[in-house]
Amino acid sequence: MEDNIEIEISETNRGNKQIIINKKHKFNFSFQRKDKSKIYRCTEYKTLNKCKSLIILNDKKEVLKYESLHNHLEKEIDVSISVAKHKIKEEIKKNSIPMDIKPKHIFNAVSQEMGLICPEYSTIRSQIIRNINKQFLPNIKSFDDIPIESEYYKAKRNENFVIFKNTDLIIFQSPFQAYLFSNCHKNIFADGTFYAAPKFSYQLFITRTYVGEFNMSNTLITTINFHCDFEQEKQKNILCYHEVKNNNDYNVNNWNYYENIEHLTNNASESYNSYLNNIFPNKPLFYKLIYILKEEENLSYNDYQRRTKGNWKKKQKIFSATDEIKILIENYKSKEINLFYNGCNRNELVKLWKECLIDLNDISINFK
């Protein structure tokens, strides 16, 4: 038996234990003997090479016997890929929230540990994404399947995020958002979007309000005006125009200009709907949607806390062409991951990266 045998425990694509010897050869489990020791044979045993090398380990993973009878070339590259996949898979399992997992970040951490023998990211990227997908909860396929309680129904500050559910409607709102709606302004604006709603649902409605001043007294607003998406514009909708023009119940002082000074709308959520539609190129998974909504709620909460302390302006960063390109590439990588999560074909990926090339060309023109 060879001296100084280096053993690593890895895993096959089917989840079975695999033994790595000296970072050069792989051994798959063959059978277990009566004394509970296990025999592993070279992965080339069932190929045309019929390699007879084997290793026997006891239940403490100690080597009892090693026959190095390899009749084929060493497989350092193949071994490095297997080890990297296994290490990354173990890192993924440690994360309880798969939406938080960044494939490239995990790869970078593992590659630093493995050093020069680590394979390139492109060779194992698809396997990383498959392992992440396996961590997701089963996708919700109908409205009735939505659970009343779930560990995902918690905001970033561990507050309840789902406040209501019946047979037709589910409402997500944190205590912070409820405070804004009940204390900050009497007008609440709502608008629906079809694109960011899960496949089994009809629409996703976003509600928004104004925060007119900060450090206000805790006075509960008793009169609430709830505005659905409505417009005052002659050419687009003459009935809607006359309804608003001739009805004093509509206070257009808080409405927005849309295309021109004659075109008013109470739709304060259109830009946010477009933002969500860009995040989800396809209909999102239910739990993916909740995750994004919680992230957005937390951003609003942090922004509110920052402004109450008098910090109104964010420090402006001067971007170079390199910065712009990096941001653009990361954005398209995120879109590509979303496509994988939602299922996609080759043509969709080709179209996505073609759009990226067009945007890259625009950046180069702007910086000349």
Image: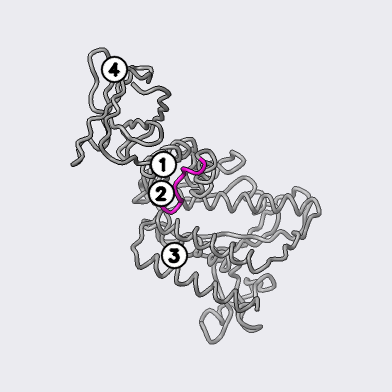
From the viewer's perspective, is the residue at label 1 or at label 2 nearer? 1
Residue 216 drawn at (x, y percent): 78, 52
Tags 3 and 1 touching, CB below 8 Å: no
The answer to which of marks 4 and 2 sits earlier in the sequence is 4
Q: Assign a secondary structure to mark 1.
A: helix
Magenta residue check for 282: no
Q: Is residue 70 above or below residue 136?
A: above
Measure the C-alpha gap from mark 1 to mark 2.
Answer: 11 Å
From the viewer's perspective, is the residue at label 3 or at label 1 nearer? 1
Write down the residue under mark 3.
194
Write down the residue under mark 2.
124
Q: Assign a secondary structure to mark 4.
A: loop
Write down the residue under mark 4.
37
Q: Residue at x 38, y 66 (%)?
A: 348
The answer to which of marks 3 and 2 sits earlier in the sequence is 2
The answer to which of marks 4 and 3 sits earlier in the sequence is 4
Write down the residue under mark 1.
80
The answer to which of marks 4 and 1 sits earlier in the sequence is 4
Residue 222 drawn at (x, y percent): 67, 54
Q: Main secondary structure of the magenta part?
A: helix
The answer to which of marks 3 and 1 sits earlier in the sequence is 1
- Report the residue that reaches farthest toward the bottom: 235
